[in-house]
Amino acid sequence: MENQVTNNANALRLFFTEEVFLVKDESVEIVHHVAAEPVLSQFVTENKSGDNSTLPSLNETISASEVVEVLQVQQESVEIPPVIALPAEEKSFKFLGGNKKSVLILVNDPQHDVSTEQGRELLRKIVKAVDLGTADFALLNYAHYSGVNFVALHQFFKPIIMLSFGVEIADLELNYEWKNEIINHETTRIIFAPNLHLLDSDLGAKKQLWANLQKIK
């Protein structure tokens, strides 16, 4: 017996003579199953250092507290360079003399380079009394450097002896009280006296100054 199975199109037309229509059935719902990927429950900022070893894999979900913990670990791992304090810039001064013997003489006169004629003459007698020449001391008019303290002056001049005429202890930010006696501050011996012009007419102050000058000769 011959095989009755055939797939010839012309032969099939002999058996299927009726028309066939395809009708869509709206009552039938076709569900397409697509494998869903798990989604992170919270957004995690990308690790700036490129190291994602602390982040969870895509197959895990994380909570808000875990996100905070991850960020804290990343922040603690960042090394903050130390702050290096720059040294203070040394102040410069315009002065007279050579300062070879590290003797600093301060005057305080905003109207003259040094003092009046009477004050300058008195100063010449003072430096001569302690055997100082112009090359031995530094003469600075403090009126041009108001607010400069002892630290800045010492840093620049390195004085062993300082004679201060019209510049007060408070001006130099020193914690002393003047009692007409030489002040020994660190490596500097300091004598305070009135402004040169006023000192010239103050006999009592001049006697006290001469007594102190004898001690530093």
Image (tube, helix red, strand yellow):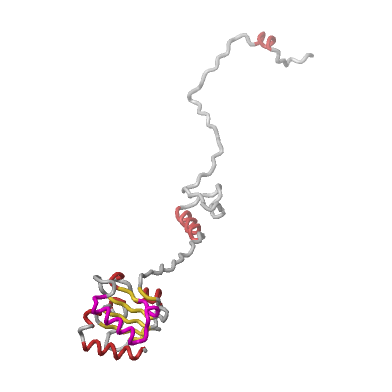
Residue 208 drawn above or below residue 7: below
Which residue is at the front of the view, 118 or 18? 118
Q: Is residue 200 left or right of residue 3?
A: left
Q: Quadrant of the C terminus?
A: bottom left
User: Which residue is drawn at the image coordinates 76% and 15% (left, top)?
Assistant: 3
Residue lying at the far left in this picture: please name it.
201
Picture coordinates of residue 187 (x, y %)? 40, 84
Asked if the stretch drawn in magenta spans residue 137, the answer is yes
Name the residue at 48% across, 23% down: 26
Q: Residue at x 45, y 53 (%)?
A: 64
Residue 22 drawn in magenta: no
Image coords of residue 97 (percent x, y): 37, 76
Residue situated in front as seen by the camera: 180 or 54: 180
> Left of 100 or right of it: where is 148?
left
Expressed as whole percent of the image width and height from the top left, the position of residue 38 reads: 53, 44
Depth order, front residue of 5/51 = 51
Q: Could you tell whether 74 is left or right of 10 in the image?
A: left
Quarter of the image for residue 65 reads: bottom left
In magenta, the rendered stretch is: 115-138
**Residue 66 drawn above or below residue 103:** above
Quarter containing the N terminus: top right
Nearest the eye: 59 or 96: 96
Q: Quadrant of residue 118?
A: bottom left
